[in-house]
Image: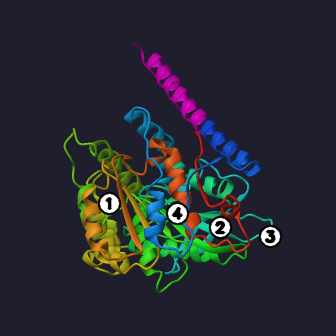
Amino acid sequence: MGIKKILKRGVFLFTAGAGLVAGFTYGWTFALHRRFREHLQKRPGKEGAVLPDGEKSMDKIGTSLREVPFSPKGPYFLRLANAFGPDLLPMCLDIRRSTAGYVYPYPTQFEKVEFESIDRTPLVGVMGLHRDGRKRPGVVFCHGLFGSKNMNYVMNPALEAFSGWDYNVLVLDLRNFGESQRLSHSPTTGGWKEGQDVLGACRFLGEREEVTSVAAVGYSLGSLSVMNAAYRCKDHPFLSGGAIAWNGAASMERMVSYISTRPPVIDMFFPVYLAFKFLHEMRRQDMLQYVRDEDARPYLESRPFTGDFKRYMEEVVAPHYERSPEEIYKMSSPSQFISEVDVPLLVIHAEDDPICPVAEMDDLGRAAEGNPNVDIWVLPTGNHCAFDAFDRRWYWSVMRGFLDYWADRPDGGASDRDAQQLTGVEG
């Protein structure tokens, strides 16, 4: 086969692949926006248990929400494809400063905003406020590792909360991710500094006159961030509507070691490990262009694919914040502080999570024992932050039920009009 034919086939395959990816992305965005518009025009159907009356407690709401049936349907790997497929392209683009934030744009009801973390690190988010003069509760959504506000698994519930559940919404890019990485070089710590980012977002949203209480929902790294924010809320009381942490961990030091170690090929984590290795290298190459910290340069200039998360913490993160790796691990690990959390906190995990092993919940459960403000659930399946693809009705019902229970709706909001029922959304 001649060189010209090979080039022609290469160009054809590249064009066809790019066309398929672009078509899928456009179609997915169109579907999300269409459902968003439909929900704004007509509230979705309701079903589920009635939320408990009387004095509020985690025990009461936990008992009520456990009555919502969890019934996964469909082939396992098809569920995974449905959960992770839509985010492959934005994950690869959001890893770089120059291409972050371009996939899955938000509807026009959302505006891009800039605000500060508690430590004054500049951050980017998108905020949706109802402009009808009626006060409503707010909720902040927080993505995971190598994620951003434009990922489907974060954008989807954010649009649902705004259009279907009658909330004001803010979705943030954590430091070092998405569009926030354009504003500063602030390495990720695994929860410590990211908890301050979440509190900064809660403060910013709560300062709007349309907002009453503010809740937070986090996924993976965002889960550790939300747990950290719930703990530090005693010093920065901006999280007033409860918090949900999906698929988090107890020990950041253990997690860094776990995701830095190559597993056996047959391990469910193996393809994720390869993806993390590739994404970490993409991030390292991008940081090489703009990071000028002398302490970080040896790591950034090392041979391709020789870096890992453990070295990153030791050679980039620790010097930047002038703390030892051990200090950062301790401040980022929920097992170190969850016993002192006084904000309603619901932690949800899956037994088959290949990224954050379920053993993390055993450690977290022991650390949280005796704290009435914390409830930890472990479901038989759901993979990593993929509950939406396993049972959307359960996922929406539990999340909305928890948020509605702790929300402040002083003028009779949507939850009161719906007789405090949990919702189920088809699709």
Q: What's the magenta region?
A: 1-25
**Earlier along the polypeptide chain: callout 2 or callout 3?**
2
Name the residue tied to disc 3.
Answer: 133
> Closer to the camera, 362 or 149?
362
> Residue 146 placed where, x, y %?
43, 55
Most distant residue in the right direction? 132
Q: Main secondary structure of the magenta part?
A: helix
Residue at the extreme left of the image, as rendered:
264
The label nearer to you, 4 versus 1, is: 4
| Residue 301, label in figure | 1
Distance from Cα at disc 4 to Cα at disc 2: 27 Å
| Crowd around label 3: few <14 · some 14–19 · many ≥20 (10 Å) | few
The residues bearing labels 1 and 2 have C-alpha atoms spaced at a distance of 34 Å
Q: Looking at this view, is 27 or 164 the one in front?
A: 164
* Residue 283 sits in quarter: bottom left
Dots 4 and 1: beta carbons under 8 Å? Answer: no
Q: Please indicate, yes or no, whether residue 187 appears anywhere in the rendered image.
A: no
Q: Nearer the viewer, mark 4 or mark 3?
A: 4
The quarter of the rendered structure image containing the N terminus is: top left
Task: Report the Cα–Cα distance between label 1 and label 3.
Answer: 54 Å
What residue does disc 4 label?
402
Q: Is residue 13 magenta?
A: yes
What SS does tag 4 mark?
helix
Q: Amino acid at mark 2?
A: Val
Secondary structure under badge 3? loop
For residue 194: magenta?
no
Q: Position of residue 51 (x, y in %)?
A: 55, 62
Image disc number at residue 113: 2
